[in-house]
Amino acid sequence: ASLRTLTLSGPPAVSLSCADLGALSRLRLSSLRLHRCAFQPGGICELLISGCALVGHLTQLDVGFCSLSADDVEEILVQVGHRLTKLCLADALVRVSSFARVAAGLTALCELDMSETDVLYPAPAAGAGHRAGLAS
C-alpha cells in the first residue's frame, strides 16, 4: 500500500521551501492538504510541475489560508483543475478571468471553498461607469 493522503497544517504556519514542494510533487497522492502553509514565491509551480506524479493523481487539494497569489491560483486551475473533485482556496487572491478561462474544464469539481477569498474583477471598460460588476 502506498501513501494516498498527506496533511501538513498549522498554526503556526508550516514553511515549505521550493525543494520541499518539489519532493511532494513526486508523490502519487490523491489528496493533499497544505492548510495554513507558507510557500516561497513560485512554490506552487514547483509543486505542480507538468507531468509530475502529483499532477497525474491529485483529486483533492486544500491550500486554504496559504496566502496564495492570483498567479498561484491560476497555476492550480490550469495544472490540476480538470482532475479535482475538491478544492480549498480559502484566503487566496483569485482573478475572475482565471476561472472563466478554465470553467469548462472543471467538470469533476464537486466542492469549492473560497471563504475569505479576495476576488479581482476585470477593470471596467472605458465609459462603462459603475455598472461593470465591481465588488463592493
Image (cartoon, rainbow, N blue to C red):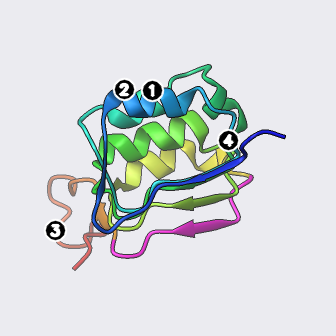
Instruction: Name the amino acid, label 3.
Output: Gly
Instruction: Name the amino acid, label 4.
Output: Leu
* 106 relative to 18 in the view: left or right: right
- Element class at badge 3: loop
* 7 relative to 68 in the view: left or right: right
Q: Is residue 78 above or below residue 86?
A: above
Q: Is residue 115 above or below residue 51?
A: below
Position of residue 113 measured from the top left corner of the image (x, y, whole percent): 51, 70
Q: Residues within 10 Å of mark 2 (few under 14, many from 20)?
A: few
Kindly report the distance in space between the C-alpha atoms of the residues bearing marks 3 and 1: 46 Å
Q: Which residues, given as a range, are shown in magenta?
A: 108-116
- Judge whether residue 23 can be spotted in this image: yes
**Residue identifier under label 3:** 129
Do callouts 2 and 1 mark residues in contact (Cβ within 8 Å)? yes
**Residue identifier under label 2:** 19
Asked whether residue 109 is drawn in magenta, I would say: yes
Disc on the earlier residue, 4 or 2: 2
Q: Is residue 56 above or below residue 32?
A: above
In the image, farthest residue toward the front: 1
Kindly report the distance in space between the C-alpha atoms of the residues bearing marks 4 and 3: 48 Å
Q: Residues within 10 Å of mark 1 (few under 14, many from 20)?
A: some
Position of residue 136 measured from the top left corner of the image (x, y, whole percent): 21, 80
Instruction: Name the amino acid, label 1.
Output: Gly
Instruction: Name the amino acid, label 2.
Output: Ala
**Residue identifier under label 1:** 22
Please report the residue visible at 39 percent of the width from the left and 55 percent of the height from the top. 96
**Residue identifier under label 4:** 29
Please report the residue visible at 50 percent of the width from the left and 24 percent of the height from the top. 49
In the image, farthest residue toward the top: 51
